Image (spheres, rainbow, N blue to C red):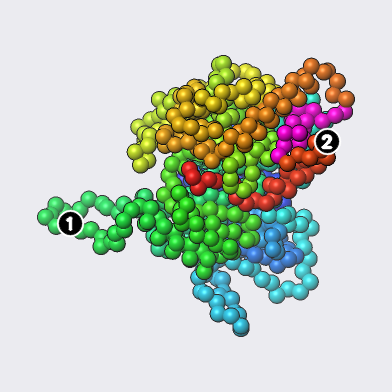
Amino acid sequence: CIRLNSVLRATGRALSTTAGKKQRPLAAETSDQHHGTRNNFSDVQSVRHEQARHSVLIGCPARINENKFLKYLSQYGEVASHFFFDSNGTHAVVEFVDLQSVESLLSGTKIPNDEDLFVVPYKSRYIRVKTTEVGQQAASSLTPPPPPQSPPASRVFQLCPLLSALEEQAHVLQDELQLTEESVRLRYLVSSLISDIATAYFPEATVHLYGSSVNSFGKMGCDLDLFLNLEDIKGYKSGKTPSSYSAEFWMRRVSSGRTAQQKILSVIGECIDSFGPGCNEVQKILNARCPLVRFSHQSSGLQCDLTADNKIALRSSELLYIYGNLDHRVRPLVFSLRCWARVHGITSCIPGQWITNFSLTMMVLFFLQKRNPPVIPTLDQLKNLAGKKEKIMVDGNDCTFVGDLNKIKQSANTESLDTLLIEFLEFYGKFDFRTNCIDIRKGIEKNKPEAAALYIQNPFEQTLNISKNVNQSQLQKFVNLTQESAFTLQDQARRSSKNGKPWGLASILQTTSSDKGATTKRNKKVSASERIGSLLDSLKDNGNTGKTEAEH
Ligand code: GTP
Ligand code: MG
């Protein structure tokens, strides 16, 4: 635990001295921002979970004196890190060095008095700090920034014309869109607060984050995907002394695992609705293929989806994390293409027949496996490197792959990001979607096993298509766009002068004639700054992620 503590302290120092400034996620702190991290997924997860357990969410007076606030908290124990943000009032996330300090703060916290309404006495780590001081002065440096979920004002288009390489543009885009340190901490803290509710019923259950919050491709405003892990409730240690007697729990039986999940999620959803600190708009979507409870966490601005026993999705997230951190070109390429797809309406925040971010990421990974030499290994190659503990079967599906990034050989491919972006567009502009299916396990095209416009084989549940929801017209739109964007970039490469026009990434982030619902007026290229403006607006809606009930 020494290593864990030193990571916590190091991160804490960085945070507390720079409240309000954009922070890089822990993973990036230990390495160069654009060259990924060698931290294993499980190590990052445990550090983050520990940070969250040591943290409290505090509603603060509007004009808070930071020094006095910290002095007040320090009577309960040493503060490791803190930051403020403004969302429905000023809030702070405060992490203590010791767990006992959290307990001590909570035991020194009153149950509120309300003369008109009855207060439900559910205590959580979301508290409010009040002050009796009149006319207090704000600490000189403290202007709480907006909640860490809203995208910051973009510098992409201001900077793009000044940058001499597309690669630099991609890095600026990634810097602007990726999750900040504060956002990551807030996500783990919300997960930890939900875990406190779930463990009131199931003390051995755990709540995990999955999806883009943890897979290294998350952008500001993406949803918070959580799953309630009940699998580890096994509760059996071999008997003390050999005996002809043995004991088992008297437990309810239901017809299927799915029914059990629905019942459990229903109850937890009810609790979140009735007592969940800062949670509202709770919807129970229990008849979906993967039953879930959706709710909004008000003070963090996070849209949360809680599922039960979704272990395969956690393995998918770890796999994407590995690919994202294996080679320095993967994340900027994925961020650029996710952004490009969103601007042109290829992906959407509403579920439907669109390509999802998850599918698009799989397409990028497949393309990178197909380079010569490959930029990233296939899933089967990662499987062959796995140690004993990494041999994992989930519901009969082989989810084995190596988790230690240091065991994976660096790629011999030296192509630039510019080349990879153009080649991606050309690759899918010519791809034979009619007969072929995409498979990152083998890294080669295969015949489609069944009719579907786009077939991307689920890497773990290998008989499933993760893009079953995509229809022919959406696929065609994607293909047309790849061709147009490839042409734009190639055309620019032929001309040496940029004529002051948007170029590189900036040029392909403009709307084009193939964009949906294009009218004659819209066919005129709108200015780059307008496009990024609406992109950022669309990111703000912070809602659904195109998750399909059909397959998810
Ligand atoms: P965002 O759009 O940024 O939220 O990306 P995301 O990767 O978090 O996607 P989403 O919230 O839609 O789904 C969360 C996770 O669920 C993904 O990362 C996948 O692991 C898994 N998932 C999503 N869609 C599918 C699907 O169609 N099939 C399968 N098998 N898993 C999916
Ligand atoms: Mg998501």
Q: Is residue 515 magenta?
A: yes
Q: Residue furthest bottom?
A: 115
Q: Determine the main secondary structure of the stretch shown in magenta.
A: loop
Which label sits on residue 180? none
Question: Would residue 256 appear left or right of 460 to someone viewing this image?
Answer: left
State left or right for residue 502 relative to residue 87.
Answer: right
Q: Which mark is residue 246?
A: 1
Q: Splitting the image into 4 quarters, where does residue 260 fall?
A: bottom left
The CB of the residue at mark 1 lies under 8 Å from ligand 1: no
Which range of residues does the magenta coloring cover? 500-516
Task: Write the residue at 62% across / 22% down.
Answer: 430
- Determine whether 381 is above or below 263 in the image: above
Find disc 2 in the rendering and name its residue: 524
**Horizontally, is 96 left or right of 387 in the view?**
right
Above or below, 294 against 486 in this view is: below
Figure check: 51 above or below 487: below
